[in-house]
Image: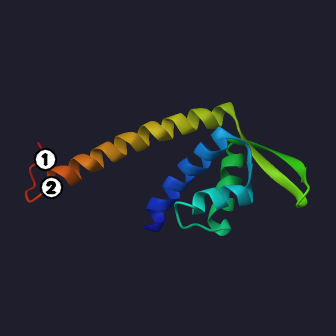
Amino acid sequence: MNTQFRKGVLEICVLALISKKDMYGYEIVQNISKVIDVNEGTIYPILRRLTKEEYFETYILESSEGPARKYYKITELGSQNLNKLMAEWKEFVKAVNVLIENDKGGNDFE
């Protein structure tokens, strides 16, 4: 998948996952990598940026399986941003589908 295209999609994926439940970084990477080929080096910068933009709050929880984990919790601002991005995504997909479905041998996009 094209790198620039993936970056925009990953932001929506990260916001959407954390909107469902608080998660720690590696858990987010594991969930996304089930459907999109990503690694920690791609996801952690997104998490840092979105936290800096106040779309997430973080907190630390002790873990019985190792060191304490930093969890990400979506804020109201983050939820609003997710809703905006989802609406834009749906419009984008709809527009692309129109182009793909209408271009079956001609360039008639009317």
Above or below residue 74? Residue 48 is below
Q: Which mark is residue 81?
A: none
Residue shown at the point (35%, 40%) measured from the top left: 91
For marks 1 and 2, give the one nearer the viewer.
2
As drawn, 39 above or below 68: below
Q: How is the image coloured?
A: rainbow
Whether residues under marks 1 and 2 lie with C-beta atoms below 8 angstroms apart, the answer is yes
Q: Position of residue 1 (x, y in %)?
A: 43, 67
93 or 36, which is in the foreground?
36
Q: Position of residue 58 (x, y in %)?
A: 80, 45
State the residue in front, 44 or 62. 62
Task: Tell me which amino acid carries mark 1.
Answer: Phe
Res 31 quadrant in image: bottom right
Q: Earlier in the sequence, mark 1 or mark 2?
A: 2
Q: Is residue 59 left or right of residue 110?
A: right
Classed neighbour count for the residue bearing mark 1: other residues with Cα under 10 Å, few (<14), some (14–19), many (≥20): few
Q: Which residue is mark 2?
A: 103
Residue sitting at x 52%, y 34%: 83
Q: Quadrant of residue 30?
A: bottom right
Image side of residue 43 versus residue 4, left or right: right
Mark 2 burial class by Cα count in 10 Å: few <14, some 14-19, many 20+: few
Q: Secondary structure at mark 1?
A: loop
Q: Residue at x 66, y 60 (%)?
A: 29
Q: Amino acid at mark 2?
A: Asp
17 or 75: nearer the viewer? 17
Count all numbered tags in the image, as a single digit: 2
Determine the secondary structure under disc 2. loop
Distance (Cα) linking label 1 and label 2 = 8 Å
Where residue 109 is drawn, which disc sits there?
A: 1
Residue 44 is situated, as x and y percent measured from the top left of the image, at: 69, 60
The residue at the point 55 percent across, 39 percent down is: 82
Where is residue 94 shown, x and y percent of the image? 31, 43
